[in-house]
Amino acid sequence: MTTLPKSDFRKYRVLEMLPGILVWATLILSTLLSFIRPLWVIIFIILFDLYWLLKVFYLSTFLIISYRRLKATVKKDWFTIVKKHPGFTDIVHLVIFPTYGENFTIIDSTFQRLLQSNFPLEKCIIVVATEAADRREGEPTAKKIQKKYEKHFKKFIITKHVLDKKTEIQSKGSNIAHAGQEAKKYIDAQKIPYENIVVSVFDIDTQVHREYLSYLSHTYLNHPNPTRSSYQPVPVFHNNIWDAPAIVRVASYGTTFWLMGEQIRPEKLFTFSSHSMSFQALVDVGFWSKDVVSEDSRIFIQCLLEYDGDYTLTPLYIPVSMDSVLSKTRIGTLAALYKQQRRWAWGCENIPFMLWNFTKNKTMPFRQKFRYVFTQIEGMHSWATAALIITVIGRLPLWFAGETIQTSVLFQNTPQLLNWMMNFALIGLILSVIFSTALLPPIPKKHAKMKYITIILQWVLLPVSLIIFGAIPAIEAQTRLLIGKYLGFTVTEKTRKE
């Protein structure tokens, strides 16, 4: 949790308990009332399913728009466009790659893809951020990469983060914060203006599109206030998608589609995983938080607070490709997928942080505070409860209602009404099939063409994925926050099959 004076600990703990209380109150009350007041629950379920039907429709519409924009973006030669901008000669990219336990092959493939960029790499500062605790792969592997690739870049820096147990947790946030501060020493020595530097943080397996740096430069240089915005690309988990089990592909695409749809509404979007921002903003907020798990979204909130709400998120309609969860065994893969989803769900730690700090900020508009807090609470609550309510709890009053209620017109028509709404909601499933196929990278020669069929059939696993790798890890994360059993940072295992 965020470090606080002891006098404020109890007050902050109350706010930490809020997400878990809301989740468990919803699950327990809806279950109990299914036996005590089944008619109430039937009405609630009808309204809840109707709400999600409408949500599927508008998210599907946003997904289509986002996909069309992405396809149009990647077709353009952004370097030819951006180099005509008068500010192009001054722009510098700082790219930070945190690593922990990844082998040379994975890191090498990341840099091989980076070399394919159509942006001049001599304008890039690269930082490979290692951990002192990673004695086997960390610094030794980073030095091999440096020897092979440093000649292509303006500067190649290797950092080694040593954990300060008093103020930090072992996490990506503490590692990249140290890396950013080390990079600042070089930047200050070179006297490069902070506002001319765009910093991107990528997981070490992130492979950028050849147009990414040019497109990001163009977006940054043409932004009305570039230092007051973060820049969010579309994450796709394609590096090893053909080797990943079907359930992993479903979960991975679910994350991609959700974020693609949300990019149409950036006023409600938080930064996630790989993202970019101005180095000026990063210095102003004191770099990433070192004592949280969800540093990717937290940095955006830090900027909101620093600039009293005068900070935005700019969507980038271009993909960055990362690894899907894949371990050496099927059981290991499923366990790793669960832990990854639980870590992402730990973003619920941002709810008390926002509530605590927004009340202290008197300048930021109330409407803006409310929108971000409500978006986070509603998103985390739905993540934990929606699938269970729709698939399980929503059926309880139909199974256990008394004879009097069973003879009512509402009860008699509810099953048909729910089925009707769920059939309409299949439009979201159909779009998932279409877009998951359209976004696929070329199939490797080692796989038969028949594997394309599994991309279609895999979506029958969606209900299972939504519950086992959606609702349950989200419930666990919010329950941990409720009882004060804080989650540490777990590194997702990255494996590539030959």
Image (spheres, rainbow, N blue to C red):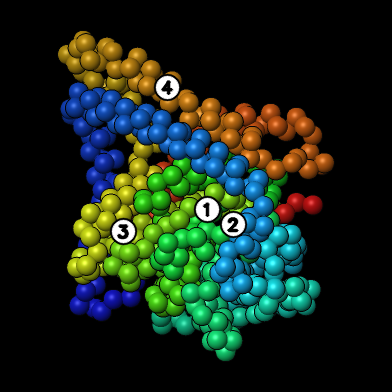
Under mark 1, the amino acid is Leu
Q: Quadrant of residue 447?
A: top right
The answer to whether residue 380 is above or below residue 51 is below
Nearer the observer: mark 3 or 2; the answer is 2
Disc 1 crowd, CA 10 A, few/some/many (<14, 14-19, 20+): many
The spot of residue 390 in percent (x, y) is: 36, 31
Q: Tag on residue 424?
A: 4
Which residue lies most toward the right here?
A: 445
* Residue that label 1 marks: 316
Cβ atoms at labels 2 and 1 below 8 Å apart: yes
Residue 38, compared with residue 371, is above or below; it is: above
Which badge, 4 or 1, comes first in the chain's sequence? 1
| Neighbour tally class for label 2: few under 14, some 14-19, many 20 plus, Cα within 10 Å | many
* Amino acid at dot 2: Tyr
Mark earlier in primary sequence (3, 2):
2
Task: List the residue tagged with mark 2.
Answer: 215
Crowding at mark 3 (Cα within 10 Å: few <14, some 14-19, many 20+): many
Res 480 → quadrant = bottom left
Q: Is residue 184 above or below residue 401?
A: below
**What residue did someone put label 3 on?**
351
In the foreground, 389 or 253: 253
Residue 399 image point, x, y percent: 30, 21
